[in-house]
Image (cartoon, rainbow, N blue to C red):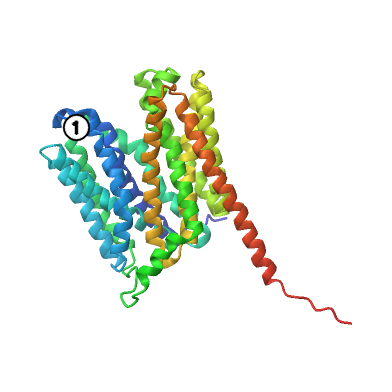
């Protein structure tokens, strides 16, 4: 008996998805690596830690605002040329940050990189969806999302270590070099076609109409709420683990690694569930996120039980990503897909910023740190209500279409 070997098309698809995973890993590392470099940057630039924190919020808000603007203004650009240009801009942003003589030029470099980031991720998701059959779209999207969880597991600690070993500027140079190396293979995957036909004067108007689609609005709302729920707790995860749960500072790195491993596992499970039922995967993922956050908040007195729920938190959070992105790809029209995915990315970053703000309000109100995941869990429950409502509505619409399609029987005498 011989073992079947993968066909050349399957190998090509696997290679393409590996390239897209590398690209999302590069962008994910470039986004989150700043967390491990902030103290060194603040000291070198002679600014306070809170001022250095603006590098995080400015990146997020650039994605929120810049992504939709770029999607609309570059709609007629050929996809391959646009991707190459955006990768070059991302390289440029990191180089500007690496050579910045002071804080504000460094912030400018971060904004340049964030602008490219906001438009690149929707392109990566779109490419992944196009190179696989529709029934495998969930797993393909999960492979792109996997790069982000790998960035948390490997990119953040490696970037931090590189910055401590050499200099924080070396991390920016490394991200620029990795982006440059990934540009050629990913450009080969992008179709050399325009997003909106140059002959279609109504193309941009039709693209904007996707924002009025109730299904698009609901899935972006779920995305924003899940991000807000997660980052209400995750923004302050270090003091949560040390002050509320009772771990030493030296254990935090290992615990965050465990969170990232949970994210990798959850991402792959979420992709498989999505290929079975997209809305089912959304509902299960959001329910698991709400449960893990509530249970984490309720178990801070028992260290290793809290660790188990931290792992589940990471798994649930990353399981939601391929589900909501695939849902958006399925409900948005082909012409408006890039804009819809860009708005989805904006919703995620807006939720991230809101989560950090909400967590800060909880702390400022004098509540204990253990209440951070509880409040996040409540936000996730709101997202769950939206997901359940959408699932119920979709079933009714499907049943209605089937009823209309049934032939009318004629009784003869």
Position of 363 relative to 329 (above/below): above
| Residue at 31 percent of width and 33 percent of height | 157
In the image: residue 17, left or right of residue 101: right
Of residues 40 and 362, which is closer to you in this image? 362
Which quadrant of the figure has residue 12? bottom left
- Residue 165 visible in the snapshot: no
Which quadrant of the figure has residue 355? top left
| Residue at 25 percent of width and 55 percent of height | 87
Tell me where residue 322 appears, x and y as whole percent.
Answer: 47, 49
Could you tell me how many numbered marks the image carries?
Answer: 1
Position of 365 relative to 57 (above/below): above
Q: Quadrant of the C terminus?
A: bottom right
Circle 1 packing at 10 Å, graded few (<14), some (14-19), many (20+), is many
Of residues 124 and 209, which is closer to you in this image? 209
Tell me where residue 20 appears, x and y as whole percent.
Answer: 36, 53
Which quadrant of the figure has residue 240? top left
- Residue 212 visible in the snapshot: yes
Q: Residue furthest bottom?
A: 413
Q: Residue furthest front?
A: 365
Position of 65 relative to 41 (above/below): below
Q: Quadrant of the N terminus?
A: bottom right
Disc 1 marks which residue?
41
Q: Secondary structure at mark 1?
A: helix
Position of 37 relative to 338 (above/below): above
Of residues 67 and 170, which is closer to you in this image? 67
| Residue at 43 percent of width and 39 percent of height | 228
């Amino acid at each position: 008996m011989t073992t079947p070997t993968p066909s050349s098309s399957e190998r090509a698809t696997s290679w393409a998805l590996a390239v897209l995973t590398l690209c999302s890993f590069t962008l994910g590392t470039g986004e989150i690596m700043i967390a491990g470099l902030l103290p060194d940057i603040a000291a070198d630039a002679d600014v306070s830690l809170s001022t250095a924190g603006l590098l995080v919020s400015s990146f997020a808000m650039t994605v929120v605002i810049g992504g939709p603007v770029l999607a609309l203004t570059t709609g007629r650009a050929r996809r391959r040329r646009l991707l190459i240009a955006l990768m070059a801009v991302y390289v440029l942003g990191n180089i500007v940050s690496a050579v910045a003589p002071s804080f504000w030029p460094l912030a400018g470099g971060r904004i340049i990189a964030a602008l490219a980031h906001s438009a690149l991720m929707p392109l990566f998701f779109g490419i992944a969806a196009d190179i696989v059959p529709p029934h495998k779209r969930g797993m393909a999207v999960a492979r792109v999302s996997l790069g982000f969880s790998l960035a948390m597991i490997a990119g953040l600690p490696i970037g931090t270590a590189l910055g401590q070993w050499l200099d924080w500027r070396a991390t920016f140079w490394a991200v620029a070099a990795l982006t440059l190396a990934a540009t050629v293979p990913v450009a080969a995957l992008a179709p050399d076609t325009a997003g909106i036909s140059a002959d279609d004067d109504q193309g941009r108007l039709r693209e904007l109409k996707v924002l009025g689609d109730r299904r698009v609005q609901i899935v972006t709302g779920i995305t924003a709420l899940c991000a807000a729920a997660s980052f209400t707790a995750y923004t302050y995860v270090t003091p949560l683990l040390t002050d509320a749960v009772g771990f030493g500072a030296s254990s935090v790195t290992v615990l965050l690694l465990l969170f990232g491993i949970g994210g990798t596992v959850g991402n792959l499970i979420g992709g498989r569930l999505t290929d079975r039922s997209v809305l089912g995967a959304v509902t299960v993922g959001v329910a698991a996120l709400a449960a893990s956050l509530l249970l984490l908040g309720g178990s801070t007195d028992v260290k290793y039980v809290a660790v188990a729920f931290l792992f589940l938190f990471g798994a649930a959070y990353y399981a939601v990503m391929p589900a909501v992105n695939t849902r958006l790809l399925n409900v948005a029209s082909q012409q408006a897909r890039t804009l819809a995915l860009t708005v989805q990315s904006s919703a995620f970053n807006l939720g991230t910023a809101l989560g950090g703000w909400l967590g800060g309000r909880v702390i400022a109100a004098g509540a204990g740190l253990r209440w951070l995941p509880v409040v996040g869990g409540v936000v996730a429950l709101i997202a769950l209500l939206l997901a359940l409502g959408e699932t119920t509505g979709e079933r009714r619409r499907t049943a209605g279409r089937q009823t209309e399609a049934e032939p009318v029987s004629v009784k003869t005498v």
